[in-house]
Image: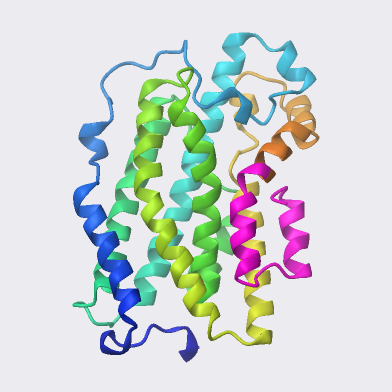
Amino acid sequence: MASSTVPPSGSLPASDQEVAQRLLDSAAKLAYDPATEVDWDTPLDKDFHGASPEWSTLYGTAYWQDMTEAQRKELTRQEAASVASTGIWFEMILQQMVLRDIYAKDPTDPQFQWALTEVAEECRHSIMFARGAEKLQAPPYRPHRAAVELGRAFKTLAFGESAYAAILVAEEVLDVMQRDWMRDERVVPFVRTINNIHVVEESRHMKFARDETRKRMRKAGFVRRRISSLVIAIAAYVIVTSMVNKKVYKNAGLDSERALAEAAANEHHKSMMRSSCAGLMEFLASARLLTKPALYFYKRANLI
């Protein structure tokens, strides 16, 4: 356990402090207040999608061809709201892990201050996602009970590279899809703004998570590396499979049984997920975190 802790400020390599200070400077110069940046007052325009259609779980299926354009737009709005709700769930886990990691450490250290800055940004993101899902006229989507309980255990027990690499997985997957959504003029404008804010601010969080994962892995022996790689992969599987709630199809006015069957067999969506994770898998491989047991879960989640 002791090997996962960050050394006192005075013994940290200068590069670690410099990275944290650069992130702090970036946050000071380029930060958003979703309460004022997002257009919350204009009524929802249902002529727009909630996300790029190509990212829908049914895009490319026979059911998608049978749906009306209005049904397609409603489905993408429900799916976008479900992704936002999953984001809130994991951001709450993330905040607790980060706070636990810096507990009782040197508050004058730039890394300590950056960690608090990240938590503050995640709080704003969670509120932004919640308001966005509400404006999309979606109900509150929550992961299934097993995922919630696994998350409860993970936020309490995960440390070091297991915590930071799992954070990176969630952020990387969201980042790729949201970069598409924020540029897509078919997506309702306020959702594009939300995605732009999240992409800009999460780029700092991903930089920190990568650096922390590399740093913790320098001290990891064979057994710890094997355990961590498996924990990260299981966390990734739970996160990714929780993104789109099964209830979105019913709430979009579709035949849930048919939608679930066609979504499960949708090779287009599986391909989109794999392509979105190419950079992430390259990083995990470079950090020696792609063991055979881990690959089993990444393949089941269609991330590789």
Residue in the foreground of this view, choosing between 89 and 31: 31
Q: Position of residue 14 (x, y in %)?
A: 30, 79
* Residue found at x 64% / y 25%: 250
* Residue found at x 67% / y 37%: 272
Can you see residue 158? Answer: no
Q: Magenta part mainly helix, strand or loop?
A: helix
Q: Position of residue 64 (x, y in %)?
A: 71, 18
Q: Quadrant of residue 62?
A: top right
Magenta-colored span: 275-304
Count of picture labels: 0
Q: Is residue 261 magenta?
A: no
Can you see residue 155? Answer: yes
Residue in the foreground of this view, choosing between 206 and 189: 206
Q: Is residue 279 magenta?
A: yes
Judge whether 216 appears above or below 77 on screen. Answer: below
* Residue found at x 63% / y 83%: 224
Question: Does 110 sit left or right of 209 as displayed?
Answer: left
* Residue found at x 38% / y 68%: 98
Q: Quadrant of residue 243?
A: top right
